[in-house]
Amino acid sequence: MVDSIGQVIGEANPFAANCASRQVLDHVTSKWGVLVLVALAQQPMRWGELRRYVEGISEKMLAQTLRALEADGFVLRASAGSVPPRVDYSLTPLGAELGQVLIPLVQWVGANVGRVGESQEAWRAER
């Protein structure tokens, strides 16, 4: 089974415990990672704009998320040497490609959250 999945997923095998792809998968599928990537897929944003757009994210989580996504090559941080400092965040070509994959996921979740809620209620009622 791993061989056939390996053919589908390419050179990495995220099912292997020591595969580096697991860390990337963690960054891009975390709640904040997905939301930041999809937000930046809409348009480049400054720190404050991004924090307001992704409601509920703390400054610490935004900083950690942006740092991880920048290190992975998905986000570009552009700092202008102005006063006050201006920092703009945008997606790299790799990040833009990933953003286009994640947008349908976020749309699907939004369209189906009611059905998931019904399933959760049914599950709780059975317990």
Image: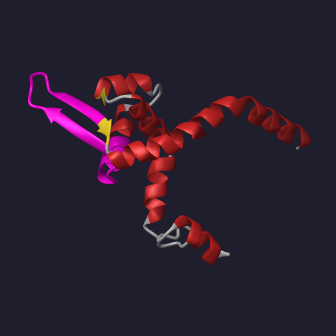
Q: Quadrant of residue 72?
A: bottom left
Residue 60 x %, y %: 35, 37
- Residue 90 against residue 23 in the figure, above or below: above
Q: Is residue 11 magenta?
A: no
Quarter of the figure with the N terminus: bottom right
Q: Quadrant of residue 39?
A: top left
- Residue 92 against residue 35 in the figure, above or below: below
Quarter of the figure with the C terminus: top right
Residue at left offset 13%, top offset 22%: 84
- Residue 26 against residue 49 in the figure, above or below: below
Q: Is residue 78 magenta?
A: yes
Residue 118 x %, y %: 81, 33
Residue at left offset 49%, top offset 56%: 25
Q: Is residue 77 left or right of residue 94?
A: left
Please say whether residue 74 is visible from this viewpoint.
no
Residue 93 x %, y %: 34, 46
- Foreground of the two, 7 or 34: 7
Q: Is residue 27 left or right of residue 59?
A: right
The residues colored magenta run 64-89
Please say whether residue 3 is visible from this viewpoint.
yes
